[in-house]
Image (cartoon, rainbow, N blue to C red):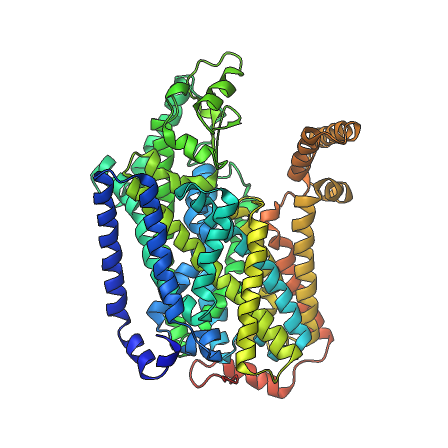
Amino acid sequence: MATQAQGGGTSDFTANLGKIYAFYTGGFLTFVVILAILEQAGVPNAVIGYLFVALTIGVYAFIGIMSRTMQVSEYYVAGRRVPALYNGMATGADWMSAASFIGMAGTLYLLGYDGLGFVLGWTGGYVLVAILVGPYLRKFGCYTVPDFFAFRFGGNVARFLAIIVLLSCSFTYVVAQIVGTGLIGARLLNMDFTVAVYVGLAGILVCSMLGGMRAVTWTQVAQYIVLIIAYLLPVVILSAQKFGLPLPQFTYGQVLQAITAREQEMVQQGLAVAGQIKPYIQPFTTYDPLNYFGLILCLMVGTASLPHVLMRYFTTPSVREARLSVAWSLLFIFMLYFTAPAYAAFAKLEVYQEVIGRAITDLPQWIYSYGKVGLINVCGAQATDAAAVVAACQKIAGHAGILRFGDFAIQADAIVISTPEIAGLPYVVSGLVAAGGLAAALSTADGLLLAIANALSHDVYYKMIDKNAPTARRLTIARVLLVGVAVLAAYTASFRPADIVAMVAWAFSLAAAGIFPALVMGIWWKRTSSVAALAGMTVGFGLCLYYLVGTRYYAGSFYETWSVLSSATDAQAARYAELKAAWLAAPDSAAAWKAYDTFAQGIANWFGVKNISAGLFSLPLGFFIIWSVSLMTPGPTAEMRAFIDEIRRPRGRAIFQEKTS
């Protein structure tokens, strides 16, 4: 696997991939069984948690070190020797980030039916990758997505714009992954969140720094095996325990019926008031139809535009293998996404049955474990310990000391990692789930950091600053940049900005607005001109960024500027004026500012479109500008038109031959 074994060694490794990863899977399952035995023998939970982290990160580090390389093609595209099956598995790990593993089921738990928009959007995006983008970029033969933009649209201006978009969406995305590693580390290892963030960072770097794409590929295959076992096992056990059938996807309907019955029961018992509970299976309780379908569109298009996903298809031996690997990717992603709704439903039922209705003085210990890291509130206060919870509930007039539906608030990011404890499963299952979440966050963070570092080292330094740079210097700069970007992302993550899924959704809208129109029209419409592509990318990306930042961070100003386009009612406008006046009267009051800003974020919009669907405006605008400007400007040369014809042909060699040493 190592650099020294480039020739026969690499061939032997590739030929024996099945045996190697079968042995790895068997070894990991044996390790889990041994830990289960140790738990029964009385080994403390903390020790089990450390053993999970030490072994899994140790294996990833071993693969990363063994995959070290000084070959440019190995570092950037894994030598273009990754078989379709394993590229599909690596893509699955690359794709199933902390947002998918930790946040997906949690979002479904909180949103119910409306959360399915994330499942549909993220899965459907791979259809667009397979049909419109992936195989054609592989036929082109580039190292990075900006390479394609530079060649197709004539130079470094297009490359520079693509880099700006890539950095914006990838950095937002990678921060979310590092937040995920911090949350898992804080719970599994009882670390401070900030410390856990930097520990996770070390795990990320050791996988990717030395071996680039080659190391990341084989590490991601190993991480996929861990994360899919970790995700399926708890819900399989719960399904078998409750319904005698270890197939949660088929017992899902029974769980939904039980949830509906329990919701009605809680109202009858006075544990919830009518109208307080959003019916779990009722559509459009959180998003209206416009935002629901807009979110699906943005996530689909964003999936087909994210550079760290697209660059995975540069690693296959041929265009045919690239197409096959998209199909394998969909299968491996489907295995998790098909289970996520059931996971959320089982978690919700456990909370309804085992937590709501219990005495405040008799709450399970796991509530305090997650309360300490800020993921659970009870009676409006952070559930750090029993005394804090009791004191908070006693402040509520008429509280009977029984936990009601409205008293309990859990963040979406806590659902998956806490479900085994909520259901009373052995701690080894909790450790396994946390290890799976760690694998998901690490795998995606590695891919994203590599995409960012490659853009800076290959596209900025090598292509725009020093085209004669020797290989050793290029790879050294790539590694230094990788570390620098990773540290900056970890520093940003230490402030825990927004929740994981929301941050990831922003990345999708940015990628969809800035890259997708020019990429698709550059491949599928020969008349697309360079000027039009640059204009479409600039306006589309700029509009999306303006909408995201304006509605989230400058909500009051945004609303006042665009109040004529806002969906705010007269009553909401009047309420906004009241809150603003209260804040202006007490400008140093944090509570007044929070009330004003939170309300403003709810009405700062155009036609009611939430910022999570920001691409709904910028995406069609980008297409329109590229189409209209192309008709008004000189078209591409005959040579470029022939090039476009060629990349649409599935057979033949890659067109673009990069210097490899």
- The percent position of residue 401, horizontal first and vertical second, equals 43, 15
10 up-or-down from 210: above or below: below
From the viewer's side, name the closer residue of 231 and 458: 458
Q: Residue at x 22, y 54 (%)?
A: 30
The residue located at (59%, 82%) in the rendering is: 469
- 34 or 547: nearer the eye? 34
Residue 203 seen by the camera = yes
Q: Is residue 241 left or right of residue 487?
A: left
Residue drawn where x is 75% and y is 27% of the image: 582
Examine the image and state in which quarter residue 236 appears: top left
From the viewer's perspective, tell me whether residue 342 is left or right of residue 585: left
- Label count reads 0
Is residue 113 visible in the rendered structure shown here? no
Q: Quadrant of the N terminus?
A: bottom left
Decide: is 96 above or below 495: below
Q: Residue furthest bottom?
A: 639
Q: From the viewer's perspective, is residue 269 above or below residue 21? A: above
Q: Nearer the viewer, residue 232 or 636?
A: 232
Residue 348, percent from left and from top: 38, 34
Q: Position of residue 231 (x, y in %)?
A: 34, 49
Residue appearing at x 42%, y 77% in the figure: 80
**Residue 12, above or below 343:** below
- Tell me residue 305's x, y (percent): 54, 64
